Image (cartoon, grey):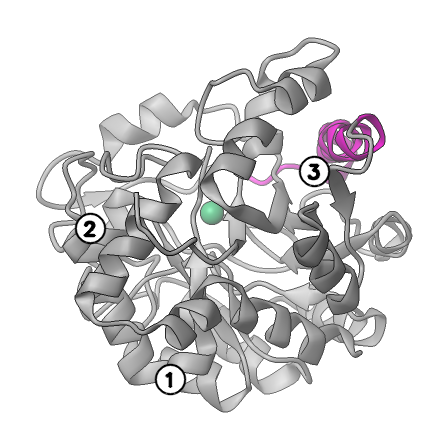
Amino acid sequence: MPDIPPHLVFDGHNDVLLRLHKKAKTGVETDFLDGDGEGHLDLPRMLKGGFGGGLFAVYVPSGQSLADMDKLMQGKRYDVPLPAVIEAAEAQPVALAMAAILFRIERASQGAFRLCRSAADIRNCLAEGTIAAVFHMEGAEAIDRNLDGLEVLYRAGLRSLGPVWSRPTIFGHGVPFRYPSTPDTGPGLTDAGKALITACNDLGIAIDVSHLNEKGFWDVARLSRAPLIATHSNAHAICPHARNLTDRQLHAIADSGGMVGLNFATCFLRPDGQRGADTPLDTMARHLDHLIAEAGLDHVGFGTDFDGAQVPQDIGDVTGLPVLQAFLGRHGYDDASLRKLCHENWIAVLERTWGA
Ligand code: ZN
């Protein structure tokens, strides 16, 4: 463990709500708060690892299992077919169930975990040692064409939305799990998708471009009045996976006052596009160096993908965050830079997006 206390980490993406939802039982909020020790995240381990908070994703799973996906991603080249569209009527109950887990965690936490709707909320939480949770949706399947769902979910605290996961929606086309590949894999936003971007701008909901294909990305760049945010994506120049960002995209993110969160998923880190727990921390540092070289130090942070992906074994779970910070310190990042990467940049970009 490092001598200097590490900076609290505010994280662009986690899937703990999916992990808890999959348990398919009541009382999962207690499992989370007491610490079930499963996956990457629970409250005791977050506190131990210096996890200050982040975007908590509501994600409606497709029928196909993630284990099947892992199998499909083996080999020097792979191209996982996009799962089928999920209709809003089918997606809404699942999304509500996962959002309810988030709200029950907050209610049962006795002040240890709070849903945040503003940058000031997040700053207060970090200062008090309360976990700062932002309600995020990864894929807009639960939102109908009239955007009624968007209005209601905003009132429930939704402050960040990815129009697509790697799956088509009525709003756009996700980027497939394809390696090697450019992110230019299909058509851009639909008319409904363009209306969704405007509605998110009007309400003050951040738009996450992480799972959009390149045409969709440029549609958002052209239409949105908000900073471009890729909550959990890496450098295509180092790992040429369709899910990663080209230098041109990184420049656009910087020009918009936006943000990219370094994804800890090994298949998006390793130059060979494979999964592998033995992925060295140095590979993460190489991505970080590149993201910063192209987008600038003020536009990069972390987007762990904890509980949604395999992460390097040297991190293991959220309690490994201090190990990463110590490594990055030895790699050459000074204290002020680490503070920006760990949480200051995320809070600043959300403030630019939501308004003060
Ligand atoms: Zn994702």
Disc on res. 281: 2
User: What's the amino acid at mark 3?
Assistant: Glu
| Label 3 packing within 10 angstroms: few (<14), some (14-19), many (20+) | some
Q: Residue at x 46, y 85 (%)?
A: 254
Mark 2 and mark 1 lie on one chain; the one further toward the N terminus is: 2
Vertical arrangement, residue 190 with respect to residue 275, above or below? below
Question: Is 222 situated left or right of 131 in this image?
Answer: left
Disc 3 and disc 1 in contact, CB within 8 angstroms? no
Residue stretch in magenta:
85-108
Q: Which residue is mark 3?
A: 87
| Label 1 packing within 10 angstroms: few (<14), some (14-19), many (20+) | some
Disc on res. 296: 1
Label 3: state its secondary structure. loop
Mark 2 and mark 3 lie on one chain; the one further toward the N terminus is: 3
Specify whether residue 88 is painted magenta.
yes
Tell me the quarter of the picture where residue 287 sits.
Answer: bottom left
Specify whether residue 226 is painted magenta.
no
Disc on res. 269: none
Q: Is mark 2 within 8 Å of ligand 1?
A: no
Q: Quadrant of the C terminus?
A: bottom right
Q: Residue at x 43, y 58 (%)?
A: 302
In x, y percent, where is residue 277? 20, 34
